[in-house]
Image (tube, rainbow, N blue to C red):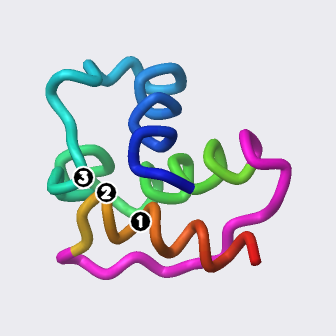
Amino acid sequence: MKVEELIALLHEEFGLDSDDVNEDTMLEEIASDEYEMQELLGCIGEALGCEINIEPAEDWNLGNLAEAVTRAEE
């Protein structure tokens, strides 16, 4: 998944302003707790038609998440 696709999905599903986020945006700025992170991963998986089973690290940004989602899709 490209970062741009992830940002577009976040905009569509969570109403995030795509001008305010980029590949360096930290995940904790988007999902403040474990519940929100699971919701985020669920939305990504639903959009891709697959289940995303990854455990994001605390210091991840959107670029890291996009790379992990790509690996999970393979």
Whole-percent x and y of residue 72?
67, 76
Three-letter amino acid code of the residue under disc 2: Leu
Residue 69, by quadrant, is bottom right
Whole-percent x and y of residue 62?
31, 57
What residue lies at 63% left-to-right and 42% top-to-bottom? 43
**Residue on which the image places disc 3:** 23
Identify the magenta region: 46-59
Three-letter amino acid code of the residue under disc 3: Glu
**Residue on which the image places disc 1:** 65
**Residue on which the image places disc 2:** 62
Residue 26, by quadrant, is bottom left
- Say whether marks 2 and 1 touch (CB < 8 Å): yes
Position of 36 with respect to 46 (left or right) is left
Q: What separation in Å lies between label 3 and label 2 (alpha carbons)? A: 5 Å
Q: What separation in Å lies between label 2 and label 1 (alpha carbons)? A: 5 Å
Q: Residues within 10 Å of mark 2 (few under 14, many from 20)?
A: many
Whole-percent x and y of residue 51?
78, 64
